[in-house]
Structure formats: structure tokens, C-alpha cells
């Protein structure tokens, strides 16, 4: 027995994409760097061990710090949230966002920088901040992006692990 396919009354569309990555933040810059013969890994110190990792270019890190200073509510946000806001602002600068638009952000984790901070505090003192859970969850990213863009549609987040 065949079931009828029910079409959406309100279609879902991807209207634009914003990117913040070690390869850059514009399609032209990313494509140029992707085609480059050089790699974009740098040595970093992680808990006393040196290893290779991808880091954002300095100009994007500085832009994130300016964003943090732009609004007193952003002072304690994890860098991952700031980067998501930066990418989302790229989108709204390119296209008009219809009323009722929502946001769907996929990430492997929530705020990892804050998670590491709170975990370190716990290891040292046996206690952690009450902000540890809400500020390090995946949903925290989409909530802050939707608030920054003043969206009145749904806010979704999903794990891409």
C-alpha cells in the first residue's frame, strides 16, 4: 500500500551561508586558501602538550573580541558563540531575512572554551559555577544568534558528531 507524500505548506529553504574558519570568512578567501599549496595548521599548546591545529586568522579573532566589547551581555560568552554570531551577521548583511525566519545551528559541542574553564575550576576547588551548564550547551549558541539577529522564528540546534 502506497502512502501519499504530504508536501510542506511552508517550505524550508537555505537562503545564505556564513563562515568563520581557519581558511577565512569569505567565499573568495576560503576558495583561494583551499587551493593554496600551503597548509593552515599551526602549533598550539594544549594542556602542556604541543600539537598541530587549525586556528582562526588574527583578524577574525580580533573581530570576535570587538564583538565581545560591543555589548555588555556578550562579555562572558564562549568564543564559539561569538564566532556563530559573526557568521550569522554575514548572512543578514547579504540577504533580507523574512519575518518568522528561524535558525538551525549544527555543532559538535556547545561552548568548549567555557567548558574547559569550568572543568578546570572544578578540578582545583571541587566546585563549579552555576553558569557551567547553560553556557556550555549546544542550544546556547542558537539562542544567542537568534537574539543577536532579533529573529522571531524557531531556534534549533543539532549535534553533528
Image (cartoon, grey):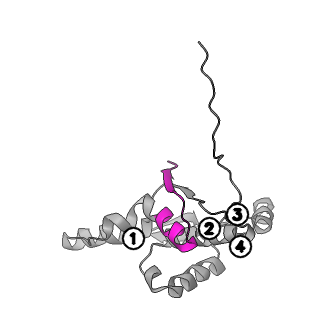
The label number, if any, that marks residue 88 in the structure image? 2
In this rendering, which labeled residue sits more in front, label 3 or label 2? Answer: 2
Task: Give the distance between the C-alpha atoms of the residues marked 3 and 1, in whole angstroms.
Answer: 28 Å
Nearest to N terminus: mark 2 or mark 4: 2
- Read off the magenta span: 141-161
Residue tagged 3: 39
Task: Give the distance between the C-alpha atoms of the residues marked 1 and 4, in whole angstroms.
Answer: 29 Å
Is residue 37 toward the left or the right of residue 91 in the image? right
Nearest to N terminus: mark 3 or mark 1: 3
Label 2: which secondary element: helix
Q: What residue lies at 54% left-to-right and 73% top-to-bottom?
A: 148
Q: Residue furthest top?
A: 1
Nearest to N terminus: mark 1 or mark 2: 2
Nearest to N terminus: mark 4 or mark 3: 3
Task: Give the distance between the C-alpha atoms of the residues marked 1 and 2, in whole angstroms.
Answer: 21 Å
Residue tagged 1: 114
Is residue 160 toward the left or the right of residue 73 in the image? right
Instruction: Out of 76 and 42, give the one closest to the viewer.
Output: 76
Amino acid at each position: 500500500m502506497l502512502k501519499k507524500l504530504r508536501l510542506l505548506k511552508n517550505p524550508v529553504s537555505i537562503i545564505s551561508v556564513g563562515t568563520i574558519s581557519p581558511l577565512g570568512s569569505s567565499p573568495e578567501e576560503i576558495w583561494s586558501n583551499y587551493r593554496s599549496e600551503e597548509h593552515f595548521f599551526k602549533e598550539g599548546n594544549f594542556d602542556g602538550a604541543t600539537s598541530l591545529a587549525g586556528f582562526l586568522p588574527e583578524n577574525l579573532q580580533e573581530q570576535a573580541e570587538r564583538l565581545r566589547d560591543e555589548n555588555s551581555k556578550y562579555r562572558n560568552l564562549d568564543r564559539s558563540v561569538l564566532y556563530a554570531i559573526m557568521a550569522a551577521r554575514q548572512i543578514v548583511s547579504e540577504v533580507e531575512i523574512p519575518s518568522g525566519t528561524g535558525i538551525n545551528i549544527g555543532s559538535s559541542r556547545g561552548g568548549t572554551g567555557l567548558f574547559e574553564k569550568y572543568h578546570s575550576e572544578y578540578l582545583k576547588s571541587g566546585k563549579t559555577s552555576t553558569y557551567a551548564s547553560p553556557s556550555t550547551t549546544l542550544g546556547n549558541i542558537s539562542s544567542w544568534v537568534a537574539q543577536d539577529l532579533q529573529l522571531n522564528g524557531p531556534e534549533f540546534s543539532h549535534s553533528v558528531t
